[in-house]
């Protein structure tokens, strides 16, 4: 219907133009109205073109499909066009007649063509978000539209053709499976140069922002034009290129890994500087995030040892608690005896007994605070002169390495805090995760203070909701944040290590930590979202004030490619009156994947992020291989994506499609500015909506 309406309006327009004389000599001389300096107003032409554009991209629905409505609609357009043409004719007729003595000629048809062209040009630079309302129901309708091409309309032909090529390569399973072997063979034959040249101009360009943070700036600006911010990630999984100088001999058991961690800090600093520029692109509405892995800041062996100690303490609490979730002094003495280092002096023994004598009962959170490695009584519980690892949980050298790790992370978090950039702490394997959670929560306590009204939460921790313990851990950490008055910040993902975790559990003979079924994982994820939104509802009801990222007790990111989880979040946000741009709920997807989700959310005013990795081509290779594998397991979605891209390209070549390339962002009102670099680490879960298999993507 809309295409015929557009044709009718333009035909009527031209019919009136043919009746207008083209020179002043043909104008009647009887008109004596005063000269009018005409300043063209393009609003009318914008409305005509915008109506055609709306219908072509599906942002508005046609009138009911009845002939009477159709006739009324067409008649209205034709009448408006005729009136506008008559008005222009009147002004130019009189103006040209008054200046007849100067022999000035005005080509009205040429002028109207200029008007029309300028109106069309003005339309092309408007942000996508200007063309639709941001009602939750409208957003959900767009998300459920399998024919939506909103993301494609913001991309160039070259980008669409590259996407077709990459998806085509990923849809060949044997090619994806053989890719690691092909790379190994090329490296052994010293042919990695030509191979990496090809990869860099195909898969790398599609899934990564560049090789350096500065190269990501162009990507960040383009995404910002569509209301999307970024989570920058230094995507390095191979060994870093270390300096030629030898590492200091004083850096513990693993000097090379300690040196690598020091180099990582400098590289992350550069990442933070680039991420901070996101505020320049998006204004103060949202900031950018930088993703970090704790394993990059310390020797993995240290984290493994620390993780074992924390797990043992948790198990000891379960063993000696009274049955009501609390442990008494006697149970604490058992924990001290069997888990902590042995006493090495009478003074240490005396201090331990003094503390225990003042304790009646403690719950799990209070017990963890009592024995915290960064707590005020660390020397009382953890100081030891035992250097044999078999006789103590952590040796003095390991405690020093722990302090160096914390110092590196605090350098990064302090810089991020000053620049209003969020830090997304990535989740990793289960044999590191307790140590990572321990470090992340202590960083949140320091940098997410709720009494700091000038900053939004800086540090986000990642929760892998495919684990059976995820919900309890989420609830416990929210409670701890409430007690200690810091903002709880989280990124929720489904998970990234399912196959590895199940295999390891089978080999070592312990129960798998992963949910038994895909539906259990979906339920766990969605329940986590509901739980956090419920905490936001409680805050609003208690204070009667709108939520903001500087005052809310909880801020979190729904880092998911699962459309159902995204729509559930939108519905629950509406139900709890959480505004899309309040800065307390974010959405995240991987760059180069699920663009329909990201661009639809960004267009409708939701805080949306793309996880944007960068790094040298050889260092990013593991990440690229995972992206290829994930796309190959979701052939149904990939085939549909390719079909839509082809249709978009054909429409463009036929002159039927309108490409929206916004040049500026329109700011929308927000309760607060979100200045944190965020996210849940580099992980975003990918779940096929039409498959019974669960596929996940992790930060590198």
Image (cartoon, rainbow, N blue to C red):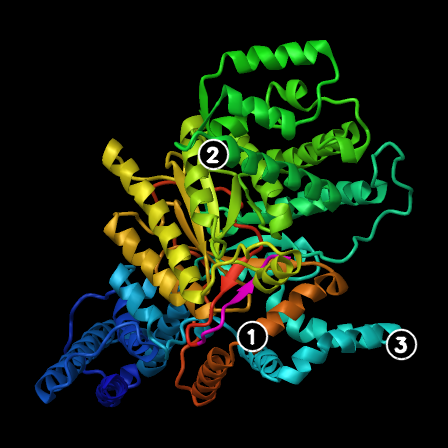
User: Given this view, does label 2 or label 1 mark the residue nearer the observer?
Assistant: 1
Q: Which residues are magenta?
A: 691-700
Cα–Cα gap, marks 1 and 3: 29 Å
Say what secondary structure mark 3 lies in: loop
Mark 2 vs 3, N-terminal side = 3
User: Given this view, does label 2 or label 3 mark the residue nearer the observer?
Assistant: 3
Say what secondary structure mark 2 lies in: loop
Residue 218 % position (x, y): 59, 60
- Give the residue at mark 1: 631
- Determine whether, in the image, residue 665 is placed left or right of residue 13: right
Is residue 697 rendered magenta in the image? yes
Q: Is the C terminus in the top left, top right, bottom left or bottom right quadrant?
A: bottom right
Cα–Cα gap, marks 2 and 1: 38 Å
Residue 161 % position (x, y): 57, 81
Q: Is residue 303 above or below residue 241?
A: above
Residue 513 showing in the rendered view: yes
Q: Is the N terminus in the top left, top right, bottom left or bottom right quadrant?
A: bottom left
């Amino acid at each position: 219907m809309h295409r015929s309406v557009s044709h009718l309006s333009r035909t009527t327009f031209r019919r009136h133009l043919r009746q207008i004389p083209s020179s002043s000599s043909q104008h009647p001389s009887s008109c004596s109205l005063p000269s009018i300096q005409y300043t063209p107003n393009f609003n009318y032409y914008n409305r005509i073109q915008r109506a055609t554009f709306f219908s072509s991209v599906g942002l508005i629905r046609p009138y009911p499909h009845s002939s009477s409505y159709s006739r009324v609609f067409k008649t209205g357009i034709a009448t408006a066009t005729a009136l506008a043409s008559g008005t222009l004719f009147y002004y130019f007729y009189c103006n040209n007649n008054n200046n007849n003595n100067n022999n000035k000629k005005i080509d009205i048809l040429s002028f109207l063509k200029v008007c029309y062209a300028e109106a069309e040009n003005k339309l092309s630079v408007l942000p996508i978000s200007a063309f639709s309302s941001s009602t939750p129901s409208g957003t959900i309708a767009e998300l459920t539209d399998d024919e939506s091409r909103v993301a494609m309309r913001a991309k160039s032909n070259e980008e669409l053709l590259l996407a077709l090529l990459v998806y085509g390569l990923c849809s060949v399973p044997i090619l994806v499976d053989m890719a690691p072997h092909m790379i190994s063979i090329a490296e052994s034959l010293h042919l990695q140069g030509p191979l990496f040249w090809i990869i860099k101009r195909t898969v790398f360009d599609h899934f990564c922002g560049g090789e350096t943070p500065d190269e990501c700036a162009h990507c960040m600006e383009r995404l910002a034009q569509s209301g999307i911010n970024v989570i920058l990630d230094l995507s390095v999984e191979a060994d870093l290129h270390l300096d030629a100088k030898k590492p200091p001999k004083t850096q513990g058991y693993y000097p090379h890994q300690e040196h690598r961690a020091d180099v990582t800090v400098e590289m992350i600093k550069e990442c933070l500087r680039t991420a901070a520029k996101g505020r320049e692109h998006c204004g103060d509405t949202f900031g950018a995030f930088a993703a970090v892995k704790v394993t990059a800041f310390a020797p993995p062996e240290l984290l493994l040892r620390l993780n074992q100690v924390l797990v043992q303490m948790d198990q000891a609490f379960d063993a000696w608690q009274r049955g009501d979730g609390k442990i008494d002094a006697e149970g604490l003495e058992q924990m001290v005896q069997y888990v902590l280092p042995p006493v090495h002096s009478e003074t240490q023994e005396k201090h331990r007994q003094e503390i225990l004598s003042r304790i009646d009962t403690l719950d799990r959170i209070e017990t963890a605070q009592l024995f915290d490695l960064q707590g005020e009584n660390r020397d009382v519980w953890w100081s030891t002169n035992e250097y044999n690892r078999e006789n103590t949980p952590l040796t003095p050298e390991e405690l020093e390495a722990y302090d160096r790790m914390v110092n590196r992370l605090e350098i990064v978090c302090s810089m991020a805090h000053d620049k209003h950039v969020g830090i997304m702490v990535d989740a990793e394997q289960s044999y590191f995760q307790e140590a990572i959670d321990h470090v992340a929560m202590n960083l949140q306590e320091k940098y997410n203070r709720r009494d700091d009204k000038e900053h939004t939460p800086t540090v986000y921790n990642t929760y892998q909701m495919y684990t059976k313990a995820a919900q309890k851990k989420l609830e416990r950490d929210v409670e701890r944040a409430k007690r200690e008055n810091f903002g709880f910040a989280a990124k929720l993902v489904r998970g990234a290590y399912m196959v590895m975790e199940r295999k390891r559990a089978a080999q070592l003979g312990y129960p798998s930590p992963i949910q038994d079924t895909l539906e259990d994982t979906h339920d766990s994820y969605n329940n986590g979202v509901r739980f956090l939104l419920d905490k936001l509802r409680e805050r609003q009801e208690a204070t009667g004030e709108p939520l903001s990222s500087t005052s809310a007790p909880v801020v979190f990111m729904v880092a998911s490619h699962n459309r159902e989880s995204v729509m559930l979040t939108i519905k629950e946000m509406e139900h709890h009156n959480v505004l899309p741009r309040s800065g307390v709920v974010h959405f995240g997807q991987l760059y180069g994947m699920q663009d329909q989700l990201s661009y639809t959310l960004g267009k409708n005013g939701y805080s949306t992020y793309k996880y944007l990795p960068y790094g040298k081509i050889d260092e990013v290779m593991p990440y690229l291989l995972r992206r290829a594998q994930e796309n190959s397991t979701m052939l149904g979605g990939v085939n549909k994506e390719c079909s839509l891209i082809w249709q978009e390209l054909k429409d463009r070549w036929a002159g039927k499609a309108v490409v929206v390339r916004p040049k500026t962002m329109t700011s929308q009102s927000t309760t607060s500015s979100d200045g944190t670099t965020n996210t849940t680490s580099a992980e975003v879960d990918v779940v096929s909506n039409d498959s019974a298999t669960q596929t996940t993507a992790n930060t590198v």
